[in-house]
C-alpha cells in the first residue's frame, strides 16, 4: 500500500547538511522523489558519537532543544543540551506513530538511524514515542557491524578506544579528502557541530586551529565519539541493544569495489576506486588481528570492501543480537517488516554512491535513488 511518509536523509562520518559547503550536494544526483513523498536532509555531528548524532537527528526532525540525556551527558563529560530547532526549522514537526518517517542513512548514518529507532522505542526523550515512529530504515554503505578501517586510523584493536596522539593525523587525512572534493568551501563553511563539547567555530579561525582544539579536548578520551562508535567493539554492543522491530521495514544497500587475489584471497581495489580510499582499502583487504572480536570471528570475512567499510559489515546486523534476514532485494516486489533485506551494488565505492560520482556513474546513481524512493513509497 502506498504511503506519504517523509524521507529523512542522514549523512555519514564527516558528512554535511544542505546549508553547508555552499550547497555542495552530499546526496549527489539522487534528488528526485515520487510526488507522494517529501525528502529532507539532516545535518548532525560529523565526528560525534552514534548516540549524540541520533539525539540531534531526533530534534531536527521534531523540533526543540537537543537533549542528549542527563546520565549520558554526565558520563561523557559534555553539556546535556545542544542546539535548538523551532517549528519552522524542524524537518517534520508532526512526527508521531500515526505520521512516521522513512529514515535513510549513509555510512555512519546507518547505525545513527538505527540508534534513533532504539531511543524512540525506549521513549528516551519523553515524547510517548515507540519504534513505529520509523516506518523503514534504509542503510547505504552502512557500518552496521563496525569497520576494520578504524584500527588503521587510530583505534586500539583490543579496546576500540582512540590511541592518544592519533586523532589529529586522522582528522587531517579526512579533511584533505573533503578539500579535494569541495575546494575552499570546506574551510569556509564546514561545521563540526561540537557546541556541547564547548568547541564552536570561531569566525575567521583557520581550520587547522579548530582541529588542534578538537584534538586536545576530552572528546576522544572515551567512547563518546565517532571513531569508537564505528569500531567492531561499539557495534557489538549496539547490535545487542538495538532490536529489529516487527513493524519496521529494513533495507541495506551494499557497496563494493575490490577483488580477491588468486593465491591469498586478499582483496585489492578495482580500477577507478577513489584514490583517497585505496590505502584504507588495501589495509582492510588483508587485515588480521591478534584476538578475535567475537566468537566465530574470521578476519577473511572482512576483507571484501568498498574502500572504507567491509561488505560483511554492510549487509545486515550479524555479530550479536537476533536480527532476522529476509534475503536479497532484487527480484522482489513484496517485503515483510521485521526482516533485513539487502542488495549488492557492484563496482561502486563508498564515495561513488553519494557526493559527486564519476561521470560514467551519474546515471547509475540517479537510478539507484529513484528505485530506492519508489520502493519506500510503495510500502
Image (cartoon, helix red, strand yellow):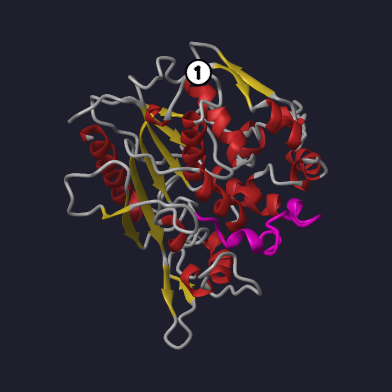
Q: Nearer the viewer, residue 23 or 67?
A: 67
Q: Position of residue 121 (x, y in %)?
A: 46, 31
Q: Position of residue 17 (x, y in %)?
A: 52, 32
Give the residues in magenta.
Answer: 145-169
Q: Residues within 10 Å of mark 1 (few under 14, many from 20)?
A: few
Q: Position of residue 325 (x, y in %)?
A: 32, 54
Q: Nearer the viewer, residue 307 or 137?
A: 137
Name the residue: 40% across, 15% down.
94
Q: Nearer the viewer, residue 171 or 300?
A: 300
Q: Quadrant of residue 282?
A: bottom right
Classify 235 as above or below 7.
below
- Left or right of 2 on screen, residue 223: right
Q: Give the mark count.
A: 1
Residue that mark 1 sits on: 127
Q: Quadrant of residue 211?
A: top right
Does the image show residue 45? no
Q: Quadrant of residue 246?
A: top left
Does the stretch in magenta take in 224? no
Dot 1 falls on a residue whose secondary structure is loop
Q: Name the quadrant of the N terminus.
A: top left
Name the residue: 43% across, 27% down.
130
Q: Name the quadrant of the C terminus.
A: top left
Q: Nearer the viewer, residue 1 or 46?
A: 1
Q: Position of residue 280 (x, y in %)?
A: 58, 64
Classify 37 as above or below 361.
above
Classify 160 as above or below 377.
below
Amino acid at each position: 500500500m502506498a504511503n506519504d511518509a517523509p524521507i529523512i536523509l542522514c549523512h555519514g562520518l564527516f558528512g554535511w547538511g544542505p546549508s553547508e559547503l555552499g550547497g555542495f550536494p552530499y546526496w549527489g544526483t539522487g534528488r528526485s522523489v515520487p510526488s507522494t513523498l517529501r525528502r529532507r536532509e539532516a545535518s548532525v555531528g560529523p565526528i560525534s558519537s552514534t548516540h549524540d548524532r541520533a539525539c540531534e537527528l531526533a530534534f531536527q526532525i521534531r523540533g526543540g532543544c537537543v537533549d542528549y540525556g542527563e546520565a549520558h551527558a554526565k558520563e561523557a563529560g559534555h553539556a546535556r543540551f545542544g542546539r535548538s530547532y523551532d517549528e519552522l526549522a524542524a524537518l517534520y514537526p508532526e512526527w508521531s506513530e500515526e505520521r512516521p518517517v522513512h529514515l535513510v542513512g549513509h555510512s555512519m548514518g546507518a547505525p545513527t538511524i538505527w540508534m534513533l529507532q532504539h531511543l524512540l522505542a525506549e521513549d528516551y526523550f519523553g515524547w510517548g514515542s515507540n519504534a513505529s515512529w520509523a516506518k523503514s530504515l534504509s542503510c547505504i554503505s552502512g557500518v552496521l557491524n563496525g569497520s576494520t578501517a578504524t584500527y588503521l586510523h587510530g583505534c586500539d584493536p583490543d579496546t576500540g578506544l582512540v590511541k592518544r596522539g592519533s586523532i589529529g593525523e586522522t582528522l587531517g587525512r579526512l579533511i584533505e579528502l573533503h578539500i579535494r572534493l569541495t575546494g575552499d568551501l570546506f574551510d569556509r563553511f564546514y561545521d563540526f557541530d561540537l557546541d556541547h563539547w564547548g568547541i564552536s567555530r570561531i569566525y575567521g579561525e583557520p581550520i587547522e586551529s579548530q582541529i588542534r582544539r578538537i584534538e586536545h579536548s576530552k572528546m576522544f578520551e572515551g567512547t563518546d565519539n565517532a571513531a569508537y562508535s564505528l569500531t567492531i567493539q561499539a557495534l557489538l554492543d549496539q547490535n545487542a541493544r538495538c532490536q529489529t522491530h516487527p513493524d519496521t521495514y529494513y533495507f541495506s544497500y551494499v557497496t563494493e569495489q575490490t577483488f580477491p587475489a588468486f593465491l591469498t584471497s586478499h582483496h585489492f581495489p578495482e580500477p577507478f576506486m577513489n584514490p583517497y580510499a585505496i590505502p584504507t582499502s588495501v589495509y582492510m583487504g588483508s587485515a588480521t588481528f591478534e584476538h578475535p572480536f567475537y566468537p566465530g570471528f574470521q578476519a577473511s570475512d572482512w576483507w571484501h570492501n568498498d574502500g572504507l567499510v567491509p561488505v560483511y559489515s554492510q549487509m545486515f546486523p550479524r555479530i550479536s543480537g537476533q536480527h532476522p534476514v529476509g534475503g536479497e532485494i532484487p527480484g522482489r516486489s513484496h517485503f515483510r517488516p521485521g526482516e533485513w533485506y539487502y542488495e549488492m551494488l557492484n563496482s561502486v565505492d563508498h564515495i561513488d554512491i553519494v557526493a559527486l560520482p564519476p561521470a560514467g556513474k551519474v546515471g547509475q546513481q540517479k537510478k539507484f535513488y529513484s528505485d530506492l524512493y519508489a520502493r519506500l513509497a510503495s510500502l
